[in-house]
Image (tube, rainbow, N blue to C red):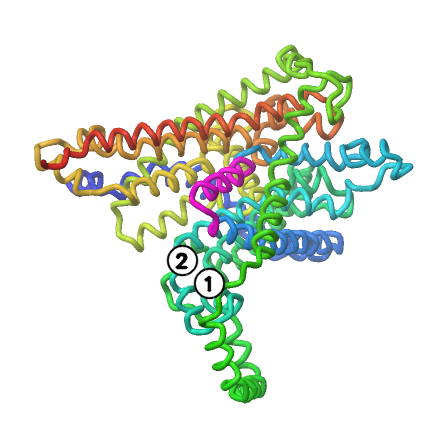
Amino acid sequence: MKTLREFGRMPIALTGPALAVLLVVFGIPIAQLFLTSFNAPAFSTANYKAFFGQPANVRVLFQTIEISVVATAICLLIGYPTAYLIVAASKRLRMALILFVIIPYLTSGLVRTYAWIVILGDRGLINNLLLDHGLISSPLLLIYNRMAVYIGMVHIMLPMMILPLVSVMMGIDKSLMAAARSMGARPFTAFWRVFFPLSMPGVRSGSLLVFVICLGFYVTPAALGGLGDAMLSTFIAAEVRSSFDIGRVAASAFVLLAIAIVMLSMLGLDLSGTSGRTAQPPLKAWYRLSPSFGVMKRYVGECFISYRAKRWIAQLYRAGGDSRWPQLVGIMFLALVMFYLLFPELLVVIMSFSAGKYLEFPPSGFSLQWYGSFFGDPSWYAAAWTSIQIGIVVAIVSTVIGTLAAYGLSRTLPRLRGFLAMVILTPNTIPVIVVGVATYLGLVKLGLLGSITGIVLAHTIGAIGYVVVIVSASLANFDPQLEQAAMSMRAGPLQTFMKVTLPLIRPGIIGGAGFAFLHSFDEFVITSLVGGISMRTLPLKMWEDIRHQIDPTISAVATLLILLPLFMLMILFVAGWRSTLGLQRARPAPAT
């Protein structure tokens, strides 16, 4: 009993509730799913042989990998220069640009997919403009093909590539570039030999996040792609809803999960943004594999040593050029990227106020008819109310559990902290369709399939990760000496937490609750698997209408979902501002 009481006082015990929920809803079911894929207790590879024995499955698997790789590469090619330009901007402009990236990131993926249907459809914005100006006689095939899938997926995943890159690049010491330039390096050489290697943690983290999430994409390929663009997640979801052969579903899910695990284990996921380590030149390994090329390079370089020395001395005392072309090109590129991220959502907002019978741009008149259609249709507002109720409960449960877990992790040994954090974030770092199948199996065992309680538990396992990450970031900037000072004045642990710790980390808790609510409110894939037939949330209702009819009411619903993250950002700003004011008031006045 004494040992149990002492364990309860350990900080690691605060992670218990979060680990218990993950274990019951996700951990045990995914272990059972893994055993089922091998036909336990007989243990055979029949399900995997059946999967790879069908050419259609193999084709879809390679197609899934191909789409994910290409989408990740496009995100990196666009995201890296965008992040570099954002970091190079002035402080105010940088904050505005980061906000422009965060807004699409927080907006529902269904809304952004719907926006591209409106733009690329046969009677969408582009085709209507071309038809009206007589440039084409029939609509172009801009949708239901691979290019449309890439456009939609890159639009959704690009913020997730940019944000880790910006985080890492902001931690790189700019004086290193200046030092390289002072030693005669050209701008590109200084960038390639100094800046780029130090930014590799952001490249690695962003690429892995985008690739793993793309593996589990379901909505965008199904809505924008054709029959030849289906991904493995679509087949898994269809199998769950139809026959639900648990062995085949388990094998398909673990084939997808194995790809994600291999990538994560090979490259690792580093979000720390550490840039102080000594970086190796990117091509060093390749030079080692080709010694003759290295010898030739050194010989040619030595021949030009005297020329380079004279050229460097000549340029050292030359006035800097006033060419503005690089700056103009950077501004134009950044403007195009921001337009690509923001215009689809802005278009939906504008078209939601159209007075016509169909979606049109520009609107022929101003009207609130589609908002009236939303609030006047019980199927719409009932689905919205269900999502709100579930989101509130998920936010409360995950915030309480996640805050306790973050507080316990912050006071745990680093190695154990890293392991437990990895366990808690597992549902957020593997393909969502695998999480959905495992959660489906877990809720079946608990008898909660198709219930609100089951959906809350299914959403909570992912929402906890958001709360832990955000609250942990707040605790990282928290001074533990404040707690020690309170305890030295005979304050108990609970009183110290409530009076000292909680007020200082309140913005992080509010932010975690907001992200948890948005995660639940926007969740579609897991909800479609565990919600049953009678349960209808707002994303499920939107998906039904997108698949069967393009009801203009969706534009009004999409506008409300776009305004939701903006409202949350305002709350976070006010909470952070009030917390800053409280800290300023708490500081002692300087002695005079």
Q: Which quarter of the picture shows residue 505? A: top left
Residue 239: % across, % down: 67, 40
Question: Quick check: 421 left or right of 120?
Answer: left
Q: Where the N terminus falls, by quadrant? A: top left
Residue in the picture at 26% in, 31% down? 502
Magenta span includes 97:
yes
Q: Which residue is mark 1?
A: 195
Q: Where the C terminus falls, by quadrant? A: top left
Label the magenta part by its dominant secondary structure.
helix
Secondary structure, mark 2, is loop
Give the spatial CA distance, label 1 vs label 2.
Answer: 8 Å
- Amino acid at the residue labelled 1: Phe
Q: Which residue is mark 2?
A: 172
User: Looking at this view, is 528 or 159 the one in front?
Assistant: 159
Q: Is residue 354 above or below residue 70?
A: above
Q: Is residue 536 above or below residue 410?
A: above
Numbered-mark total: 2
Kindly indicate whether the residue at mark 2 contacts the one at mark 1 (C-beta within 8 angstroms): yes
Magenta span includes 416:
no
Q: Residues within 10 Å of mark 1 (few under 14, many from 20)?
A: many
**Residue lying furthest right:** 137
Residue 395: % across, % down: 42, 28
Residue 67: % across, % down: 67, 52
Question: Quick check: 60 left or right of 129?
Answer: left
Residue 395 showing in the rendered view: yes
- Amino acid at the residue labelled 2: Ile
Residue 118: % across, % down: 73, 32
- Where are the magenta residues, as a range? 87-105
Q: Residues within 10 Å of mark 2 (few under 14, many from 20)?
A: some
Tell me, for residue 474, which label it has, or none: none
Q: Which quarter of the picture shows residue 152? A: top right
Sooner in the amino-acid sequence: mark 1 or mark 2: 2
